Image (tube, grey):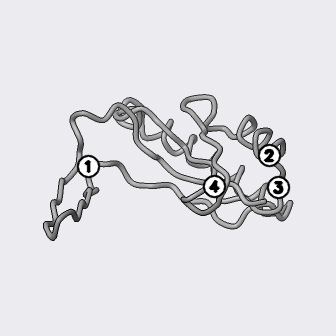
Amino acid sequence: MSYMLLIVEPVGQRAERTPEQGREAYAAMVDYAQSLEARGKLVDARSLASTSDSVRVQARGGRTTLLDGPYAEAKEMIGGFFLLQDVTYEEAIAIARDCPAAQWCTVEVRKLGPCFE
């Protein structure tokens, strides 16, 4: 099975860190991704930029609406992801538990599959 681990972090959390703390957190995540890759479990892992550089797109009824970030109503943002392969549900949970980000945010485990299931 394939699973995606979504790193769900509070908006503004990154700004609360010193640059050194930010680099340490990022290095821990890179090291963790490399360990998963060495085990043959990782397809891809990426960090996402803050929502200040994002846009939400809605296309309904022939009309397109764009909403530029940051989003005042948002309390959390997706800060990154790990795409896993050849893991069981239990392995995905264990990998999420061991992820360094689980110490400062939520790691959401999602099975990949069609949206109609």
Dot 2: few (<14), some (14–19), or many (≥20) neighbours within 10 Å? some
Q: Report the mark closest to the observer, 2 or 1.
A: 2
Say which residue label 3 marks.
87
Where residue 54 appears, x then y in whole percent?
28, 56
Task: Give the answer, above or below, for where 94 lies relative to 50.
Answer: above
Q: Closest to the observer: 89 or 91?
A: 89
At 44% from the left edge and 55% from the top edge, which residue is drawn?
48
Kind of residue at badge 2? Tyr
Q: Label 1, label 4: how many angstroms apart (C-alpha)?
A: 22 Å
Q: SS class of the residue under badge 1?
A: helix
Q: SS class of the residue under badge 3?
A: loop
Query: Who comes first in sequence, dot 1 or dot 3?
Result: 1
Where residue 62 appears, x then y in whole percent?
15, 70
Kind of residue at badge 4? Phe
Q: Is residue 67 left or right of residue 105?
A: left
Say which residue label 2 marks.
89
Q: Label 4, label 3: how many angstroms apart (C-alpha)?
A: 13 Å
The label number, if any, that marks residue 52 in the structure image: 1
Q: Label 2, label 1: how many angstroms apart (C-alpha)?
A: 34 Å
Do residues under tags 4 and 3 come within 8 Å of each other at their CB atoms?
no
Labels in figure, total? 4
Do residues under tags 1 and 3 come within 8 Å of each other at their CB atoms?
no
